[in-house]
Amino acid sequence: MRLRPHVLIVEDDPDTLLLFRVNLEHAGFMTSLAADGGTALRRMEAEGPDLILLDLMLPVMDGWAVLAQAGGRDVPVVVCTAKAGAEDRSRAVRLGAAAYITKPFDLHQLIDTVWSVLEERSVAESHWVRAELEVESPTAGIEPT
Amino acid sequence: MDGAHPSSVSDRIRREAKVVGLRGFSSPSLEAVERRRMQLWILTAVLLVSVSGATALLSMWGGEPLRFWFTPRVLRWGVVLLSLAFCSYAIEKELHLRKLARLLIDERVLTAALSNRLREVSALLEAGKAMNSVLELDSVLDIILGGALELLLGTSGSIMLVDAPKQLTAACVRGNERARDRAVPFGEGIAGRVALDREPLLIHGRADAEQFPGLVDRTEPVESAMCVPLVHREELLGVLNINTDAGHRFTEYDLRALSLFAEQAAGAIANARLYEAEQARVAELTELDRLKSEFVALVSHELRTPLTSILSASGTLQRPDLAETRDEVAGIIERQARRLAQMLENLLDTVRSEQPGVLPKPSPVDVAELVREAAGDFELVGSPVEVEAPATLLVRGDAYTLRRVLDNLLDNAHKYGRPPVRAVVRTDGSTAIVSVIDRGAGIPSEERELVFERFSRLERAEGRPGLGLGLPIVRGLVTACGGSVWIEDAPAGGTAVCISLALCPDEEKV
């Protein structure tokens, strides 16, 4: 049993990826990173994350394909995108997205959403302690993709 | 019959009919006239036989006269004079009957001609209605050609339209497949002659090759052919050709009818072309509208990403427990703010490059030095550029504008291509050519012009940041400097974006 929920962050902008990582880890999550859709799928298979934070516009394979694959594996996905159109939102919901956040957003809003999605999955409270945990060095860099 | 008016013929017929005793008929028939002639000559013959008999009897009469003047001699002369008077009456009637018969024949001919004219007018009206009932040019041409063949009993024909300066091309063909898509310059062959002179032509049998230079010999000779110009509001739209096989010959009257028909057809063709142009314009505007909507969505998307980074970074900076990340997060804010500024600059460049006269007057610029400067700046931010350039090469342009061009090209090469990125400056004696070369996947030749259109980004650029304005801006700026820009394959694979600029004349070199 893991003490900290594992979030796979999929985002192609290195700066945004770094900021998500720093703040999510500070909020008590364990993170792994992917800068394109192909890497995201491989990490999803290999690591079995508890939640995926997913950008939609990605190189190699776009976020829609990742979302479809994640839906099949019952991994909750929080879509975090600059696509603000209602069509994209409803398409994401149809594909099984647990939440849809449009950029720009507040970090607190993002972290709250991630927590609430995990809590809705009912396993959250029993397994994880929503508390300040030890944070890894935020400057550790992004894993190569 | 020429010049005969139907109403005057009818009046004369009524008059003549009255004279010859055909009063019961408002319009006597030729058969009635013939019957009356027969009656007249039978009567005359009976009378002459009777008179001859009477005269013979009187000659044999030898008795005394009833009165002193009532002698056989007087009686004989009386009978002769009476018969002469009747004969003169019969001849006069015969003359009137003949005249009446001629008039009736004239009337029949006129009626037939009128009914023909009526048929043609009605066919013209029907064709006009049909021509105006559709607006697609191909359908209009088909209806015109079909209507003309039906109206004039033609067996084959074609419509040739002016589709290039001084050139006709067959746009609709029936019965002579060899004529399909044939192009004829003005002045060549029958159609070219008609297009040049704008005068209709009627030709019987084989056309004279000397009279019509460039004439294409037909495999199947025609009995006669007509060719009329299609003119609408003084503008020649094309020509209409109609041919007929052996057994039917066109007349001057047919040529007049076809000319009338062509006037109406030209109007319908002009309307169809106007409609097609309008449709194309609507499609163009719709596409532009779609592209602009996409562009707005793209701009909003591209602005949201750096804004998210800036907001997240400033939120991170405000947390004392993350103080150790301060420098890195501050760097993120600066990078993302610069990204936003770059986007704004690109948007402004787009507007600037569309406004003539905004750019300064061209002056001598050392393009080789400019390329080295730009490459040096890219090197500083970790995007190396290999430069191959002469020591100096002066072109006519604006230094700031050309630097914007180079920055855009080098940025694109790093963003969408693969390293190494090279900048090559060379000259062919009259122009300087600057090529920015990458080792990426290259751009297919059919998409090379597309990338210069505003708001267009190739499929594979999706997922990478950018507004799709880089190359349109480059083209606008280079054009403003009097140069040109194009894309070609790089010798070792990848893309080479080339710009050519006029070399600075010696007298301008200070």
Image: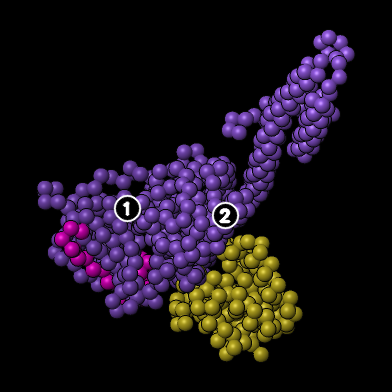
Chain colours: A yellow, B purple
Callout 2: residue from which chain?
A: B
Q: Is residue A80 above or below residue A129?
A: above
Residue B27 visible here: no
Residue at image position (67%, 78%) is: A76
| Of the two numbered discs 1 and 2 in the rendering, the one whose residue sits closer to the viewer | 2
Segment colored magenta: B410-431
Of the numbered discs in the image, which one, if any, rests on residue B381?
A: none
Q: Nearer the viewer, residue B69 or B472?
A: B69
- Name which residue lies at 69% across and 67% down: A90
Residue B362, given in percent of the width and then of the height, sits at 24, 47
Mark 1 is surrounded, within 10 Å at the Cα level, by few (under 14), some (14 to 19) or many (20 or more) other residues, namely some
Q: Which residue is mark 2?
A: B248
In the displayed structure, would residue B163 be above or below residue A64?
above
Which quadrant holds residue B367? bottom left
Q: Amino acid at mark 1?
A: Thr
User: What amino acid is at disc 2?
Assistant: His
Question: Residue A134: horizontal and vertical position, in percent?
Answer: 55, 80
Which callout, 1 or 2, points at the residue further toward the start of the chain? 2
Query: The N terminus of chain A lies in which quarter of the figure?
Result: bottom right
Q: Which residue is mark 1?
A: B479
Whether B372 is drawn above or below B16: the answer is below
